[in-house]
Amino acid sequence: MADDDIFSVRPEIAASAHADAARYEEMYNASVADPEAFWAEHGKRLDWIKPYTKVKNTSYDYHNVSIKWFEDGTLNVCANCVDRHLKDRAHQTAIIWESDDPGVSQHITYQELYEQVSKFGNVLHSLGVKKGDRVILYLPMIPAAAYAMLACARIGAIHSIVFAGFSPDALADRINDCGAKLVVTADEAPRGGRATPLKANVDKALARCGSDVRCLVVRRTGGAVPMTEGRDVWYHDEVERVSDHCAPVEMSAEDPLFILYTSGSTGKPKGVLHTSGGYLLYASMTHQYVFDYQEGDIYWCTADVGWVTGHSYIVYGPLANGATTLMFEGVPTYPDAGRFWEVCAKHKVNIFYTAPTAIRALMGQGEEFVAKHDLSSLRILGSVGEPINPEAWRWYHRVVGRENCPIVDTWWQTETGGILITPLPGAIALKPGSATRPFFGVQPCVLNDRGEEITETACEGVLAIKDSWPGQMRTVYGDHDRFVSTYFEMFKGYYFSGDGCRRDKDGYYWITGRVDDVINVSGHRMGTAEVESALVAHPKVSEAAVVGFPHDIKGQGIYCYVTLMSGEEPSDELRTELRNWVRKEIGPIASPDVIQWAPGLPKTRSGKIMRRILRKIAENDFGALGDTSTLADPSVVDNLIENRAVK
Ligand code: 6R9
């Protein structure tokens, strides 16, 4: 039984960890017994200009949802990430940049970061950007992306990063929604040996925006791009004209830091708004404890700054802690499937944080790509973005971690600002596939369909959070009602995560996927993730996505899209084999009704499977596939429709 499959805490990790088991219990209990006192104390990890006297002022009351932390304190987020480290670590590397080209990397010290960010702030000023203005960043994974974020924070502007893989239309929607006055971009974004024409995309987007929106262009590849007179300027020209001193602006803890758009279950993307003090405190504290970050560690989060993981765990958390953070421009499979491990070896990475989808992809390529590289520097591994199936967990643990690196499976969301449920490596025994226990100050609970909290330890339901934590989003930009109705209406008095979960007898949380992914087969509730996990545990299966479809007798049936390992051939025998395999892994109740061979699955550019589309195909409802524009490869959908399995 998975619940009893336990990897105990490694004594050598516990011995030097920021929290061992006893310390975790003590701090956790203190954090929920008296949140005011707990956060008043830990708020001191930031440098405040005017110290706070009020700590927590939050209400989950449906009629009056309001979230404020440290509201009378003032600070500057950039000064906390840069200036305050100059005294002790001016010459320490702040950012290691690894380019898409494996021959090119760069070390940027805190002193250089300070100079670059100050100049960037002055360029923004010179273009008329002021405190409270919105600035869209549409950039490759280059140091200038971090400079631009921090420069906005320095002058009090609100950044909104749009992932460089998004289309011109998606970009235009975001520019318009937040009323940005400036878009910062680059000529082109190299990834995996190919270049995305960012500036050309901005040109298309700006054709749909107000004429007052300007564009600042950073040179990355040197590719020729047209510049529109009076609207577009080159960064390298502007920076010649500015001084290298830029005073950080005093900001209230509750002044906005950034907006990040995220897709909901329906409708247009929501502008998730995060503010300054609580967000930074939470990002920095989770970064320290969850990854057991130690002075001198080389830390690498493989996310893109276009996603929340990049905000909190490439830029803000690590830099607030004076860490050395690695920024990677490329992809895991270029020039070959060993790139991650090559980079780990090259820069002697100690802490490595990635997504299950990457692990599964690399797992399918074979162990020899890992074995070639010296991974002895690795100490802690992390996972984020989706439930990690035990099969991938074990591979990550055995092959990448050589069985001596704890894996922190971190559950959180764009909305939560930082990690909420996770093991602490020196404190909490691991179970493959479980995000384990709550971080300090986080009170998860499991609700039944009627919105009642289930009090038994072992149970299953929807995951909600009982009280606020400092990193929580404050509102949907420009639409507070949507914030309230999305997260606080269905289950009154709680923050509703949209995820389902199970809590086992040891109080461990197992995220079962979005609630809309839960299917009901003959009256039994089943996480589609469970069936997927069973399927990908089969040696011939590389990836699987499972959705429900209407079934005359069972209510819902189980429809499986299966991608085979390269070299494996689809056959009816294999179909039967997989069906029996799942019956064996989970039980006859989980027996797949349909198995469709899928050469590719429809994924967003961040690697999340778009189950909404798979459900429609399974339901034979091709007319209503909805918006497919955010897919990494829309042609995948046509293939699935063409080859739809006949029931
Ligand atoms: C950080 C991030 C949030 C959704 C979330 C959940 C899924 C993220 C997970 C996980 C299981 C984990 N999710 N981490 N599910 N285990 N460790 O990914 O933010 O892009 O907003 O996605 O991702 O379903 O609700 P975001």
Image (cartoon, helix red, strand yellow):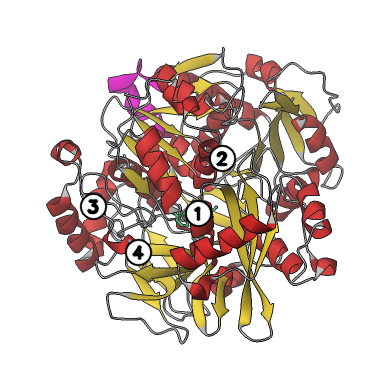
Residue 159, horizontal then vertical, whole percent: 59, 43
Badge 1, how many Cα within 10 Å: few under 14, some, many 20+?
Answer: many
Give how far apart the Cα atoms at labels 2 and 4 are. Answer: 26 Å
Q: Is residue 542 above or below residue 493?
A: above
Label 2 lies in ligand 1 vicinity (Cβ under 8 Å): no
* 581 displayed left or right of 279: right
Q: Which residue is mark 2?
A: 361
Which element is circle 1 on?
Answer: loop
The amino acid on which the numbered mark 1 sits, given as a three-letter code, is Glu
Label 4 lies in ligand 1 vicinity (Cβ under 8 Å): no
Q: Residue at x 55, y 84 (%)?
A: 522
Badge 2, how many Cα within 10 Å: few under 14, some, many 20+?
Answer: some
- Determine which quarter of the picture holds residue 273: bottom right
Tag on residue 509? 4
* 559 displayed left or right of 1: right
Q: Which residue is mark 1?
A: 386
Residue 443, horizontal then vertical, whole percent: 32, 67
Q: Which residue is mark 3?
A: 428
Badge 4, how many Cα within 10 Å: few under 14, some, many 20+?
Answer: many
Give how far apart the Cα atoms at labels 2 and 3 are. Answer: 28 Å
Label 1 lies in ligand 1 vicinity (Cβ under 8 Å): yes
* 230 displayed left or right of 242: right
The amino acid on which the numbered mark 3 sits, given as a three-letter code, is Ile
Residue 28, horizontal then vertical, whole percent: 21, 59
Give how far apart the Cα atoms at labels 1 and 3 are. Answer: 20 Å
The amino acid on which the numbered mark 2 sits, given as a three-letter code, is Ala
